[in-house]
Image (tube, rainbow, N blue to C red):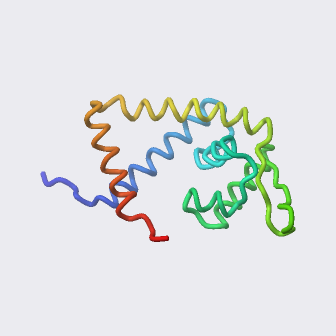
């Protein structure tokens, strides 16, 4: 049987499968955010009051996708929009105390899933996989 060498397809399917699995794991654990929303919380936990453009640039997503994520987080009380001083149309995103708690719950599940991914592979295979993924990231990184 011929090996499937459609790398873009395989990477896309693996990413979607892993995202779905992680979101399901978060939900089963009673965590109210998706992995994408959790990513926003993780960033805000590292450095609070980031603007929406910065969040979009870090995640390589457009303004409407960031707005959707922030809307959902705000609806659940995990973040608040604060008007950026000197620019009434720009907002800084602030993580709330309940957002910090949710981030802590989500990070535990994300770590568990990360370990679950690695368990089927040797440490050498994991290192090789990381090298391939980082190589892809480096090769196709947009020029600034």
Number of on-image labels: 0
Q: Is residue 26 left or right of residue 121?
A: right
The image shows residue 2, relative to residue 63, as above or below, that is above
Q: Quadrant of residue 67?
A: bottom right
Frontmost residue, 117 versus 125: 125
- Can you give x and y, in whole percent of width and height, for residue 14 in the image? 39, 49
- Position in image of residue 109 (x %, y %): 56, 32
* Residue depicted at 65% across the width and 60% down the height: 54
Task: Name the image quarter holding residue 101.
Answer: top right
The residue that appears at 79% across and 66% down in the rendered structure is 90
Position of residue 11 relative to residue 128, above or below, is below
Q: Is residue 71 above or below residue 31?
A: below
Drawn side of residue 134 relative to residue 113, left or right:
left
- Residue 61 located left or right of residue 21: right
Residue found at x 84% / y 68%: 87
Which residue does the image show at 51% across and 32% down from the upper left?
A: 111
């Amino acid at each position: 049987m011929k090996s499937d060498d459609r790398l873009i397809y395989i990477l896309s399917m693996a990413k979607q499968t892993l995202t779905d699995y992680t979101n399901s794991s978060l939900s089963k654990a009673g965590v109210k955010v998706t992995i994408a929303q959790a990513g926003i919380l993780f960033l805000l936990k590292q450095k609070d009051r980031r603007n929406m453009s910065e969040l979009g640039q870090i995640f390589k997503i457009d303004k409407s996708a960031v707005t959707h994520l922030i809307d959902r987080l705000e609806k659940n009380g995990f973040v608040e929009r604060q008007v950026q001083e000197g620019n009434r149309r720009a907002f800084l995103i602030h993580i709330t105390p309940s957002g910090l708690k949710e981030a802590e719950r989500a990070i535990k599940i994300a770590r568990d899933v990360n370990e679950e991914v690695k368990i089927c592979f040797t440490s050498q295979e994991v290192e090789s996989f990381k090298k391939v993924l980082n190589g892809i990231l480096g090769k196709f990184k947009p020029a600034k």
